[in-house]
Amino acid sequence: MLNKNTAFFCIPSMEESGHELCFISHPTYDRRVGCNIFGQIVTTGNWKGWEVWRFHRSDDDGTFIITSWTRDHKVLCSDGSGRVFTTKNKEGCWEKWRISRQPGTHGVKIQSVEHDRFLAFSGHDLYTMDKEEDTVWHLEPAHGNQFFISATCQDKRLSSSEDHPFTHRNRKPWEKCCEKWVIEPTYSEMGNFTIRSLERGKYLGSEQDGRLVLSESKHHWSIESSPHEGSVVIKSVEHDLQLSCDENGHAHTTYRACGRKTWRLEPIMPCTISSKQIVGTGSAAIISAVAAPFAVVGIVGAIGFGSGGITAGSIAAWMMSTEAIAAGGGVAAGGTVATLQSIGAAGLGAAGASVAAATGAVVGGGLSSAGVAAA
């Protein structure tokens, strides 16, 4: 985004926007606050879509309403006893939070406005307390400072091999890590950044003759707004050369002014699924079935969770796929899909289904696409 007071690009912060997408992370325990498929508060070690929260600034008093990004109708809430949970109500007093910086740290305090209590974590339980000690949280941008860098004049993204950068036409971000770049401020001067390849771990740089390089050493770039809406100009600080993409799609730096020197920075968000997808595909009915074990066994088999695995093309196969996407590539032990598969594979009765639903038992310790049976 662009700083309100300057023409420089800057990493979004809550001081500059009415709402931001952030991870709520505890620095001591390295855990994130999340909202699971049931809409319940959880704490995990993941950095996925389930752990992203949207901070909505209230215009009247500067406080925030905090909603789950994935389960977007769920609002973070607390009561006077210290219990933290979610609700669908966005208009109440219990749902308002005050965010304040913790002096001498990079952290913040998250305080219930109504109860004057601070969000805290014991390493196991999330709660609020009336003392400020050990209540520091880090709000990390959901995109992790990761961006695709795309030429506005060409349908090309900046990519990299082991030794040098190049441009490539690609629109499958989950397959091409070499097109992901980490843009981080240098803090030495406003508007200066380093641009690091996520895949290679090396920094984008420019030679005096305009050649682009990947280097172990940090190179500084300035990023400024362009007259073209939504685009930026990226310039090598060392050589005063602007990043450009010629008519052949070749990336380089140059002095010459032309229309091929503007770029789009596309933030890379964690994979997730929306609440509409969860409800619209019948998952809400599946969740209800898990809570009602006497009806589970028949429903589980009907939707594709069987003793031989997951039936290809079934609702079960879709659920496994969407949960894997949301989790970034795997199906977690103890999750909804793992629990239902354990019930289907074992052919559990009502009592066994109750136990499986309560404990998230997994047959074989986990699931993968190899568990999908042939149609």
Image: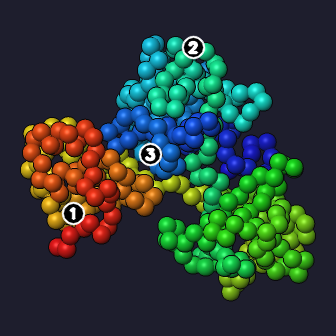
Q: Residue at x 86, y 71 (%)?
A: 241
- Coloring scheme of the render? rainbow
Q: Residue at x 47, y 42 (%)?
A: 44
Mark nearer the N terminus (2 vs 1): 2
- Dot 1: what SS? strand
At label 2, counting other C-alpha atoms closer than 10 Å, the crowd grade (few under 14, some 14-19, many 20 or more) is: some
Estimate the spatial distance between the alpha carbons at disc 2 and disc 1, rounded to whole Å.
49 Å
- Dot 3: what SS? helix
Report the side of 254 relative to 196 (left or right). right
At label 3, counting other C-alpha atoms closer than 10 Å, the crowd grade (few under 14, some 14-19, many 20 or more) is: many
Q: Residue at x 15, y 54 (%)?
A: 346
Q: Are marks 3 and 1 in contact (CB under 8 Å)?
A: no
In the rendered structure, which amino acid carries the disc numbered 3?
Trp
At label 1, counting other C-alpha atoms closer than 10 Å, the crowd grade (few under 14, some 14-19, many 20 or more) is: many
Q: Nearer the viewer, mark 3 or mark 1?
A: 1
User: Dividing the picture into quarters, in which one does residue 140 lie?
Assistant: top right
Q: With respect to residue 196, does 335 lie above or below?
A: above
Mark nearer the N terminus (3 vs 2): 3
Mark nearer the N terminus (3 vs 1): 3
Q: With respect to residue 209, does 269 lie above or below?
A: above
User: Dividing the picture into quarters, in which one does residue 98 lie?
Assistant: top right
Q: Could you tell me if residue 281 is visible in this image?
A: no
Q: Are marks 3 and 2 in contact (CB under 8 Å)?
A: no
Checking the image for residue 330, the label placed there is none
Which residue is labeled 3 in the image? 50
On the image, the x and y values in percent for residue 37 come to 34, 43
Q: Nearer the viewer, mark 3 or mark 2?
A: 2
Which residue is labeled 2 in the image? 130
Which residue is labeled 1 in the image? 310
